[in-house]
Structure formats: C-alpha cells, structure tokens
C-alpha cells in the first residue's frame, strides 16, 4: 500500500512497506538480531511467494507478516530476563540458533540461565524452569503473539497479517504454539514467515550452507515440506543470495513489495507512532504508558508555550517515540533495582543513539530523530549522547526533556516508588537552568495546576 503523506504543507508519498520496514529495525534490536533481519525475512518471504505463484494480495500478506513478525516481542523481554536471569536480547538471539530436540533445549537452559548470577540463584532459576517450563513457555508465547496481532491491527494491517503474526510459532507437525495447529491449518503467511526467519538466522550464523542445512533439517517438523522445496530451489540461484546479502537489500525489498495505492492522511502517521510507542512501553512493566503520557504532557506544554499548531503534531510524535532506542537495552538493565555499573550505564545511554538511528531511517520522521534523541541532553552540557549545550538544544527537545523528567519521577521505577507531584516538582526545580529549561518548567507547573489528573 502506498500512503500519501502531508507534512507541514509539503506533499510526498511513502509506501507503508517502506515506512514499516524502517521501523522494523527497532524490532530487530529487541530480538537481538543483526540489523535488517526483518527486512531480509521479508525478502525471503517475497521470493517464496513469487515462486508459489501467489497473487498480489497473498504476496502482500506474506511480505507484511515476515516484516512485522516481531511486533509483540518486546512484551516478553522483562519476563525472559526475570526467569532466566539473562540479557533478554542475547538469550533470544542464541535461542533461535539451537538445534531442535529436548537434549539441545536442556543444554541451552543449563548453559544460559543465570550465567552471571550467584550459584544458588542459578540453581533456583533452573529448577523453576524445569518444573514450570511448559506453562511458562505457553504464557510468554501467547502474550507475545496476542500483542503482536493487536499491534498489527493498530497499524491497520489486514487481519490476515495479524493472524499470520499470531501463528508464527506453529509447527507443521503440530508441536508449536500457541494453538498447536498442524499442516495447512497454519496460515500460509505464518508458514512462510517462520521459514524466512530460520533461513535468515542461520544464514547470519553459518552462511549460505548453514541456512540451507537448517531449513532442510526442519522439513516436515517445523516447516512445510513444500515451502522447504521452494527454498532449496531458490538457494541454488546466485541472484537470491546476491540480493539477500546486498547492502541495498532495503531498496530491493521496497521495490519488490506489492503496492496497492491507498490514500491516507497524517492520521496514519499518528497511528503508527502510537502503535510503536506501545511496543516500546511493553519492554518493561515500569514503562507501561510512559510514551503516551510523555506525548500527552508534551502536547499540553506545547500549547501553553504557543508552539505553532503545525509543529504540535510533529512534537507529539517525537515525544511518543523518544525512547524507541530502549528496545536495544537489556531488560536486565532496565529492570535493575539498584545502581547501574559503568557497563550497564553505557548501555543505557546508548538508547538515545539508537533512537536517532531508527527515526533517521524514516522519511516522514527524519526531522524528529534529532529532536527525540536529544531528550537526555542538558543545558549545562553534561547530558548525552552529544553533550550539547544551551542554545544547541532545540525548543521541542526541551519540552520533551521536561515531560520525560516529570513522568520518570511521578511513576514507579524498579529502584523506587512514584514520587508525589510536589516532591517531583521540587526535585525538578533544583535542575532548572541545568537540565530543565526555565520556560518549560514554568509551563509544566501551570499545566499540573490546571489539570487535576496530573496533580493527583
């Protein structure tokens, strides 16, 4: 689908696949996959769909299911970190590369669980997994699949795509989850996307031969035998690997994607922003609703500060996506109840740079990359990631910084409970002129005073 976008009076066009393809790099982060994983999966899925002779509608379903397959993956990140005492991103990445079968699964669990934890904690975590593993696995997959399908609907994707995402982890032999579907009862888009995922993961880990061998090994177990035969044929063609390995794979995928022209206004950009804000917030129970609240506060402050109406909508989007880079931060760091060590603090600070890189890929959101990613800069120059000072920090960024600071103080965090409003404002008052813009802080005080829900 191609959507017509109107931004600040300038008219341009952007395809939904291009837009969501850029956002898919955020999903790669939370899955611990090399950048471009979802785009490469969409390429593999598209080539399989072509070889099957599918029409443009069904090809579009396969493409979008593969591209957006990980929409729900942030929802199980904190649970994985808690259960396995591990970095959720590394755990997920390694989990995808283990051979099938109980012995391999047990070796992985014993080896990866609590690698840096105390011995007693490690043994306790392993015992819990062995005792409740099947129930826990089902719970996490249902949560992930349900959220992924719901976000797909929020993005106004076809319900076939939502169902394709929901059933991604079903296996041809009926051994998968969440519903234990088997054979052709599994949606075709799910079967294609799962094969594409396995092919790309093992291609990244073991090259072309690694991908071929693993796909064939799972034939008739995890994977639809017909699709495996199609992949084997493609894997014998030089152009298939050349395009998959090309640094221009994004452009290749965008050019190949089915495109039905659909007129859409900027409301769709708002829908995309809100949906990915929820993906970010799902990363941690402590950030539930954070992106929406910061966006609401930023919009309120912008109006009090007489920001031009044409800029308010852009500012709200930047505020909603300011923390999208946190998808690249381990949940073990985000959930840590104590002080972060130097390595953990370095990882946490990197989220701002991740935000800049992700939003910078997205045409209609590119200007927001600078505004959103600078929300931890300080007027006194002691912030990050660039150490900007005073006049180098844009007014929109100062608004987001103020709102982010306020919400962080007045919401629960792993290391402390939520502060009462007046105490939070007192803490912020001490940072006025250093971290907090005076004009923005005065407007925040007025906003809180005039809105009983904020002062509660």
Image: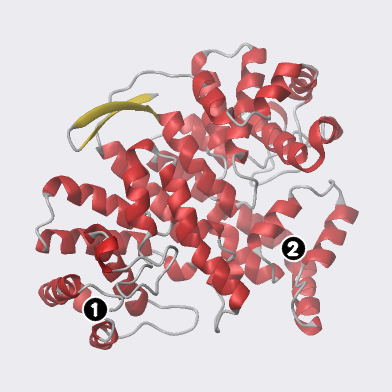
Residue 286 position, x and y percent, is: 45, 71
Query: How many numbered tags mark residues here?
Result: 2
Residue count near mark 1 (Cα–Cα under 10 Å), binned few <14, some 14–19, many ≥20: some
Q: 22 or 63, which lies in front?
A: 22
Q: Is residue 282 something one can see in this rendering?
A: no
**Could you tell me which secondary element the residue under label 2 belongs to?**
helix
Q: 59 or 298, which lies in front?
A: 298
Residue 414 position, x and y percent, is: 49, 79
**What residue is shown at x 79% (from left), y 84% (from top)?**
120
**Could you tell me which secondary element the residue under label 1 belongs to?**
loop
Residue 123 position, x and y percent, is: 81, 78
Residue where numbered disc 1 is placed = 433
Task: State the quadrant of the N terminus.
Answer: top left
Q: Is residue 343 left or right of residue 121?
A: left
Q: Is residue 66 something one can see in this rendering?
A: yes
Residue 204 in which image quadrant: top right
Which colour assignment does the render follow? secondary structure
| Mark identifier at residue 133 | 2
Q: 11 or 61, which lies in front?
A: 11
């Amino acid at each position: 689908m191609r959507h017509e976008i109107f931004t600040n009076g300038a008219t341009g066009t952007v395809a939904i696949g291009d837009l969501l393809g850029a956002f898919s790099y955020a999903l790669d982060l939370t899955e611990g996959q090399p950048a471009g994983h979802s785009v490469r999966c969409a390429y593999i899925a598209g080539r399989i769909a072509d070889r099957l002779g599918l029409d443009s509608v069904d090809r579009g379903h396969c493409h979008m299911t593969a591209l957006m397959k990980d929409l729900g993956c942030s929802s199980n990140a904190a649970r994985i970190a808690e259960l396995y005492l591990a970095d959720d991103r590394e755990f997920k990445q390694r989990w995808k590369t283990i051979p099938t079968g109980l012995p391999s699964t047990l070796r992985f669990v014993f080896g990866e669980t609590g690698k840096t934890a105390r011995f007693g904690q490690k043994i306790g975590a392993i015992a819990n997994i062995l005792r409740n593993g099947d129930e826990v696995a089902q719970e996490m997959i249902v949560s992930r699949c349900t959220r992924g399908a719901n976000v797909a609907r929020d993005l106004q994707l076809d319900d076939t795509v939502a169902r394709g995402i929901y059933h991604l982890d079903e296996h041809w032999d009926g051994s998968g989850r969440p519903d234990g579907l088997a054979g052709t009862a599994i949606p075709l888009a799910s079967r294609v996307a799962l094969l594409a995922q396995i092919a790309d993961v093992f291609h990244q880990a073991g090259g072309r031969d690694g991908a071929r061998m693993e796909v064939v090994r799972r034939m008739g177990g995890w994977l639809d035998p017909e699709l495996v035969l199609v992949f084997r044929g493609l894997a014998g063609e030089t152009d298939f690997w050349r395009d998959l390995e090309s640094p221009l794979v994004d452009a290749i995928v965008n050019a190949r994607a089915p495109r039905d022209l659909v007129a859409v206004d900027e409301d769709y950009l708002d829908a995309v922003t809100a949906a990915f804000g929820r993906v970010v917030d799902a990363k941690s129970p402590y950030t539930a609703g954070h992106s929406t609240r910061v966006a609401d506060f930023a919009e309120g402050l912008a109006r009090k500060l007489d920001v031009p109406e044409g800029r308010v909508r852009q500012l709200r989007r930047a505020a909603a996506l300011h923390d999208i880079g946190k998808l690249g931060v381990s949940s073990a760091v985000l959930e840590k109840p104590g002080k972060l060590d130097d390595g953990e603090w370095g990882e946490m600070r990197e989220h701002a740079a991740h935000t800049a890189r992700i939003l910078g890929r997205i045409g209609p959101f590119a200007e927001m990359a600078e505004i959103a990613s600078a929300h931890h800069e300080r007027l006194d120059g002691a912030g990050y990631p660039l150490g900007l000072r005073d006049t180098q920090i844009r007014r929109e960024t100062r608004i987001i910084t103020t709102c982010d600071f306020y919400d962080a103080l007045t919401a629960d965090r792993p290391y402390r409970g939520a502060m009462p409003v007046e105490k939070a404002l007192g803490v912020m008052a001490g940072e006025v002129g250093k971290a907090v813009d005076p004009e923005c802080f005065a407007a925040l005080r007025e906003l809180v005073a005039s809105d009983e829900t904020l002062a509660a």
